[in-house]
Image (cartoon, grey):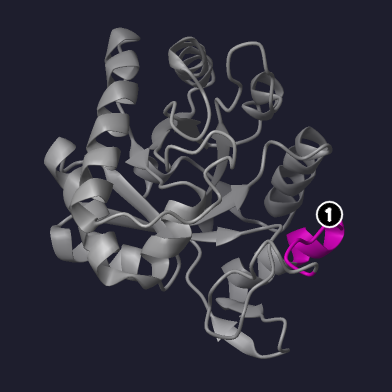
């Protein structure tokens, strides 16, 4: 029976602004990527989200991004590898403080937004991120886009890596995600999104927008928690995967 992890970005509220329905989604996902205060989140939200994840026995991950609250970390920034290293160490260390305060352990690190996408293609940036994660804790699991430079960099650094695929995003024939600026970047139909995921898991293939099959290795499935129907989709996909004889478990339990 295939086994996969389902991860979701969380802790994205900030100050008086509320984003996402973390408490409800945590009932369905197996790993949580918690914002570390740069692209979203703040210290109080970080603490509360870590506590919620622990209460649900959900794998806890740090979600470091660019210091870009206004752009939600989705805009590219011209950073050196050294700057990227510092950004990741700083944010992972901050979240890990709250994790330890709750008597828990940090399971993984998943870069956010533009940092994630840039590291998928830029090996020097990917190496810097992987080294930062390793230096904080070599037992951490590094999440990266399946087939990307970030996954390769993590393996080269001596980390366990999790190849990530996306339920609600379309793909290009080179295996990259379609840019969010493209009107065809998102899959809004729940049935179509789940059909894509099941094929990725059972056949290791995804059909690109160019109608070309791309080989893909899914170990963790990303769902987005900030969409209007996020909770409904989380419930739908977990039910559908179980009905397809796919086991769901946090990444550290089987990687």
Give the vertical position of 63 relative to 125 (above or below).
above
Q: Percent x, y for residue 72?
A: 58, 40
Q: Which residues are magenta?
A: 184-195
Q: Residue at x 66, y 91 (%)?
A: 212
Q: Nearer the viewer, residue 254 or 139?
A: 139
Q: Is residue 164 above or below residue 105?
A: below
Q: Residues within 10 Å of mark 1 (few under 14, many from 20)?
A: some
Q: Residue at x 53, y 37 (%)?
A: 30
Residue 160 left/right relative to 18: left
Horizontal arrangement in the rendering, residue 176 relative to residue 16 (left or right): left
**Residue 189 within the segment the image draws in magenta:** yes
> Vertically, is 108 above or below 35?
below
Near-viewer residue (71 or 100): 71
Q: Who's the residue at 39% across and 72% down the image? A: 121
Position of residue 20 measured from the top left corner of the image (x, y, whole percent)? 69, 28
Taking the image as drawn, is residue 98 in sight?
A: yes
Secondary structure of the residue carrying numbered label 1: helix
Tell me, yes or no, if residue 255 can be seen here: no
> Who is closer to the viewer here, 208 or 127?
127
Q: How many marks?
A: 1
Confirm whether the magenta stretch covers residue 194: yes
Picture quadrant of residue 160: bottom left
Q: Position of residue 174 (x, y in %)?
A: 53, 84
Q: Quadrant of the N terminus?
A: bottom right
Q: Residue at x 71, y 88 (%)?
A: 210
User: Residue 197 at what x, y percent from top left?
Assistant: 67, 63
Q: Is residue 146 left or right of residue 133?
A: right
Q: Which residue is mark 1?
A: 190
């Amino acid at each position: 029976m295939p086994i996969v992890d389902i991860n979701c970005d969380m802790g994205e509220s900030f100050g008086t602004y509320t984003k996402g329905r973390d408490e409800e989604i945590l009932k369905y996902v197996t790993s949580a990527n918690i914002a570390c205060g740069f692209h979203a989140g703040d210290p109080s939200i970080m603490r509360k989200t870590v506590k919620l994840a622990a209460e649900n026995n959900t794998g806890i991950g740090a979600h470091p991004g660019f210091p870009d609250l206004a752009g939600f970390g989705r805009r590219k920034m011209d950073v050196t590898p050294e700057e990227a290293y510092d950004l990741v160490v700083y944010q992972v260390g901050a979240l890990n403080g709250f994790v330890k305060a709750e008597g828990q352990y940090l399971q993984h690190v998943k870069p956010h937004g533009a940092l994630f996408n840039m590291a998928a293609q830029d090996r020097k940036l990917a190496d810097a991120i992987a080294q930062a994660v390793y230096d904080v804790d070599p037992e951490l699991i590094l999440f990266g886009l399946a087939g990307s430079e970030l996954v390769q960099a993590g393996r080269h650094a001596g980390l366990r890596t999790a190849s990530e695929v996306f339920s609600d995003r379309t793909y290009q024939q080179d295996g990259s995600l379609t840019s969010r600026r493209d009107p065809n970047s998102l899959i809004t139909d729940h049935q179509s999104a789940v059909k894509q995921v099941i094929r990725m898991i059972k056949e290791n293939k995804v059909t690109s927008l160019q109608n070309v099959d791309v080989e893909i290795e899914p170990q963790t499935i990303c769902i987005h928690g900030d969409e209007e129907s996020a909770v409904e989709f989380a419930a739908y996909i977990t039910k559908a995967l179980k009905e397809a004889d796919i086991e769901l478990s946090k990444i550290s339990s089987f990687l």
